[in-house]
């Protein structure tokens, strides 16, 4: 009996395209949870004056917990709208690449915030 081609490579990895719901969940997780926590971390260690967004900077100065509430509310709204508009979004060419790019940019923002906090902690 002939062996399938993939059986001859014991350490092969097969990647699957993420589903629409997985991408929306990733977006909500990165932009909501990750961005909020990394922003609070950077503001706590480096000070709120380094925040680029003037609205978020104002909230960080007056009440940091409002930053979490605002970011969670916005990203929850975006997640619900994306889930409700799934049929429309999936008709757009390269919708998966667009959502992956938005998630990747969010990850870059989270890493940037974390980097600022870590650098400020070592100074």
Image: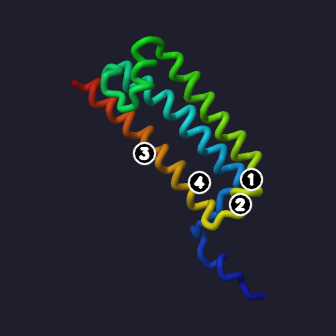
Which one is earlier in the sequence, the residue at label 2 or at label 3? 2
Residue depicted at 54% across the width and 23% down the height: 68
Instruction: Give yes or no for contact between labels 1 and 2 (Cβ–Cβ under 8 Å).
Output: yes
- Is residue 49 toward the left or the right of residue 95 in the image? left
Mark 1 and mark 4: Cα distance apart in space: 12 Å
Q: Of label 1 and label 3, which has the lower sequence position?
A: 1
Residue contact between numbered discs 2 and 4, judged by CB atoms under 8 Å:
no
Residue indicated by mark 1: 86
- Pointers 3 and 4 in contact (C-beta within 8 Å): no
Of labels 1 and 4, earlier in sequence is 1
Q: CB under 8 Å between callouts 1 and 3? A: no
Please give the residue where the numbered disc 3 appears in the rendered image. 108
**Element on which disc 1 rests:** helix
Corner quadrant of residue 77: top right
Residue closer to the observer: 3 or 29: 29
Vertical comparison of 19 with 46: above or below = below
Marks 1 and 3 sit apart, C-alpha to C-alpha, by 25 Å
Q: Which residue is mark 4?
A: 99
Compute the Cα span from label 1 to label 2: 6 Å
Mark closest to the chain's N terminus, 2 or 4 = 2
Q: Are marks 1 and 4 in contact (CB under 8 Å)?
A: no
- Mark toward the viewer: 1 or 3: 1
Q: Position of residue 49 (x, y in %)?
A: 31, 22
Against 2, residue 8 (above or below) is: above
Image coordinates of residue 75 in percent, x first then y, are 61, 35
Residue 107: percent from left, percent from top: 47, 44
Residue receiving disc 2: 90
Q: Nearer the viewer, mark 3 or mark 4?
A: 4
Spatial CA distance of label 2 from label 4 is 11 Å
- Distance from disc 3 to disc 4, alpha carbons, whole Å, reads 14 Å
Count the marks: how many? 4
3 or 4: tag closer to the N-terminus: 4
């Amino acid at each position: 009996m002939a062996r399938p081609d993939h059986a001859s490579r014991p350490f092969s990895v097969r990647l699957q395209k993420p589903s629409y719901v997985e991408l929306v969940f990733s977006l909500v997780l990165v932009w909501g949870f990750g961005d909020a926590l990394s922003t609070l971390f950077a503001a706590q260690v480096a000070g709120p004056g380094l925040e680029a967004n003037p609205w978020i900077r104002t909230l960080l100065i007056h009440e940091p917990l409002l930053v979490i509430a605002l970011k969670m509310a916005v990203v929850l709204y975006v997640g619900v709208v994306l889930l409700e508009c799934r049929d429309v979004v999936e008709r757009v060419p390269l919708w998966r690449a667009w959502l992956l790019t938005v998630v990747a940019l969010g990850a870059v923002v989270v890493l940037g915030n974390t980097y600022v906090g870590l650098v400020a902690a070592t100074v």
